Image: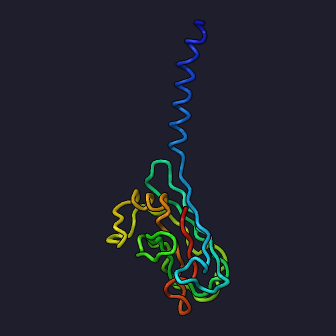
Amino acid sequence: MRKTRCLLPLLLIGLLVVTAAASAAPLNFQAHLSGDDEVPAVDTDATGHVVFQLNSDGTALDFRLIVANLDNPVAAHIHCAPVGVNGPVGVLLFSTPTTGTVNGILAEGTITAPNTGNACGWTDLAAVVAALESGNAYVNVHTSPAHPGGEIRGQVR
């Protein structure tokens, strides 16, 4: 009986340590981008995939945006809006107009804050992450001259 009483506090401490470690793990978000998810839908062979990883202390969001068959990209953003709705820009991911077809990494980097004065009302990185977690954010890539409003889009989850 005495051994059981000594073991129980150790098990509880172990459970607390495991729970704390799990809550400090980085968060991952992703989206597949296609013309079908643009509003209205776009007929295109272009596709993409974006991956985000929030660091364990919530101060930096690393991302990588990969595309295929995308002609003349000019910009990529995180927008705030649910599925099927167009929304304003919250975070700029890419803004270097490129001529020709892109296959591979279009943009990668680290986000530490949303765009200043963005129309999403995001004031800090925590607000951006909350939108990603809730499914109320999407990424799209704009091309010129074919689709300045967006050629491929994906809801982040």
* Count of residue discs: 0
Judging depth in this view, the residue of 64 and 85 nearest the camera is 85
Tell whether 43 sits left or right of 156: right
- Please provide percent x and percent y for residue 101: 65, 85
Judging depth in this view, the residue of 106 and 23 nearest the camera is 23
- Please provide percent x and percent y for residue 82: 47, 69
- Please provide percent x and percent y for residue 138: 50, 70
In this view, the residue farthest toward the front is: 84
Question: How is the protein colored in the picture?
Answer: rainbow
- In terms of image quadrants, where is residue 115? bottom left
Q: Is residue 145 above or below residue 116?
A: below
Q: Is residue 117 above or below residue 73?
A: above
Q: Classify the position of the N terminus by image quarter.
A: top right
- In terms of image quadrants, where is residue 90? bottom left
- Please provide percent x and percent y for residue 63: 54, 64
Residue found 54% across the figure and 50% down from its top = 26
Tell whether 140 sits left or right of 66: left
In this view, the residue farthest toward the bottom is: 145
Residue found 40% across the figure and 59% down from its top = 125
Residue found 48% across the figure and 79% down from its top = 95
Q: Classify the position of the C terminus by image quarter.
A: bottom right
In this view, the residue farthest toward the top is: 2
Residue found 39% across the figure and 59% down from its top = 127
